Amino acid sequence: MEGNWAKIGLYISIAVTGLLVLGFVAESVGLLGGGEGAVSNEPIWLLDTATGESWSVSQKEFTEMMQQQGGDPMMMMAGPGQMAFNNPKTGKKTVVIAEKCAKCGAVFVPNYTQDYPDRCPKCKSSRLEELSKESK
Ligand SMILES: [Zn+2]
């Protein structure tokens, strides 16, 4: 009996982690909340993987950029970090959505193969991890 409950608990925690990651991605592309007013004003960080240059755009600018380049938000949900955009300066498709570390300010590409995709490569802090600790 006890073994079963442990298994169920594990499944739930996996599901919760999945939801957190999905919610995080949806939030970063401004899909959550629906209405215009619900979209957060947090900037979206972009990183050019070729030049190492990083800059931020507003959610509105980002949506416009995606529309101009034929980006599909659902495609991004399917493969976060896989989708690249044209750099307006170089014209090359080397720009990806990045994360800015709230602690040390490093801008980096989220790594979806690690425990928390937003774990900072410099100071190892993760906003997702902190959120998941808080909710426990
Ligand atoms: Zn950091």
Image: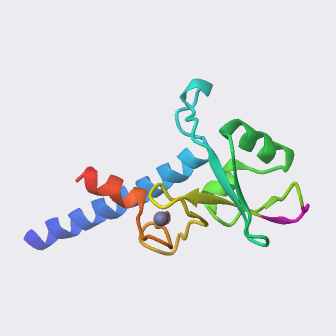
Q: Is residue 130 above or below residue 48?
A: above
Q: Name the residue nearer the viewer: 37 or 2.
A: 37
Q: Name the residue nearer the viewer: 85 or 106.
A: 106
Q: Is residue 53 magenta?
A: no
Colouring method of the image: rainbow
Q: Would you identify the image quadrant in which residue 82 lies? A: bottom right
Q: Residue at x 43, y 66 (%)?
A: 116
Q: Which SS does the magenta portion mostly show?
A: loop
Q: Residue at x 58, y 35 (%)?
A: 41
Q: Is residue 82 above or below residue 88?
A: below
- Residue 25: give x, y in percent of width and height: 55, 53
- Residue 43: give x, y in percent of width and height: 62, 44
Q: Would you identify the image quadrant in which residue 99 lies? A: bottom right
Q: Residue at x 33, y 57 (%)?
A: 130
- Residue 83: give x, y in percent of width and height: 72, 62
Q: Name the residue nearer the viewer: 68 or 47.
A: 47
- Residue 24: give x, y in percent of width and height: 49, 51
Q: Residue at x 57, y 31 (%)?
A: 34
Q: State how many labels appear.
A: 0
Q: Is residue 91 magenta?
A: yes
Q: Please indicate whether residue 125 sits to the left or right of residue 2 in the image.
A: right
Q: Which residues are magenta?
A: 90-94
Q: Please indicate whether residue 4 sits to the left or right of residue 66 in the image.
A: left
> Outermost residue, front direction?
104
Q: Quadrant of the N terminus?
A: bottom left
> Outermost residue, right direction?
91
Q: Is residue 79 above or below residue 65?
A: below
